[in-house]
Amino acid sequence: MEAATLRPVGEIASYHAHVYFDPESEWEHALALRAGIGERFAVRLGRVWDRPVGPHSRAMYQVAFAPAVFHVFVPWLMLNNGGLSILVHPNTTNPRRDHLHDAVWIGTALSLAGEVLPDDQAADLAGEPNTTPHKAP
């Protein structure tokens, strides 16, 4: 058996968290969590989708964040997800692998349409945060 090639953590340009919800029964909870994220973390809050989009099988919103935020933000999501499913994945040059193989789930894992994701593209940077945190995590 040949040894696997180990990948360096430095290939991660940023992370995304996708917060999934049922628009009919979890809308208010999902938006309250989104507001809590914006109050506490220097992240980029994406558009709220009330329907499935791209590879995602449920309504959701995306939160883009830098690697330096991971160690505080992801544990906070673990403790505050309130039953929502959340996919956290790295952004490297392979979005399909990022979403399907290198991701972690908080809550119940959901299906993804991985076939719509490219194997190769430029890594997604977190970008400038669009929030001004004013509360401690």
Image (cartoon, rainbow, N blue to C red):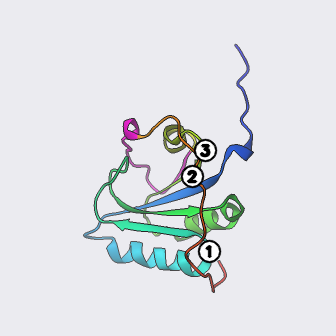
Which dot, 1 or 3, sits closer to the camera? 3
Q: Quadrant of residue 116?
A: top left
The vertical placement of 87 against 127, above or below, is above
Query: Which residue is under mark 2?
Result: 124
Foreground: 53 or 81? 53
**Mark 2 burial class by Cα count in 10 Å: few <14, some 14-19, many 20+:** some
Q: Measured from the top left, where is residue 111 in percent x and y?
A: 37, 45
Query: Which residue is under mark 3?
Result: 92
Which dot, 1 or 2, sits closer to the camera? 2
- The kind of residue on which mark 2 rests is Asp
The vertical placement of 56 against 83, above or below, is above
Q: Which residues are magenta?
A: 103-116
Q: Measured from the top left, where is residue 69 in percent x and y?
A: 68, 65
Whole-angstrom CA distance, mark 1 to mark 2, is: 19 Å
Q: Quadrant of residue 37?
A: bottom right
Q: Can residue 115 be found in the magenta stretch?
A: yes
**Outermost residue toward the bottom in this view:** 134
Q: Are marks 2 and 3 in contact (CB under 8 Å)?
A: no
Q: Which of disc 3 and disc 2 is earlier in sequence?
A: 3
Q: Quick check: 63 left or right of 74?
A: left
Q: Which of disc 3 and disc 1 is earlier in sequence?
A: 1
Foreground: 111 or 49? 49
Say which mark, if any, is on residue 88: none
| Badge count | 3
Q: Which residue is rendered at x = 40% and y = 72% of the image?
A: 30
**Outermost residue toward the front in this view:** 122
Query: Which residue is under mark 1?
Result: 41
The vertical placement of 48 against 90, above or below, is below
- The kind of residue on which mark 1 rests is Phe
Q: Measured from the top left, where is residue 53 in percent x and y?
A: 33, 54
Q: Are marks 1 and 3 in contact (CB under 8 Å)?
A: no
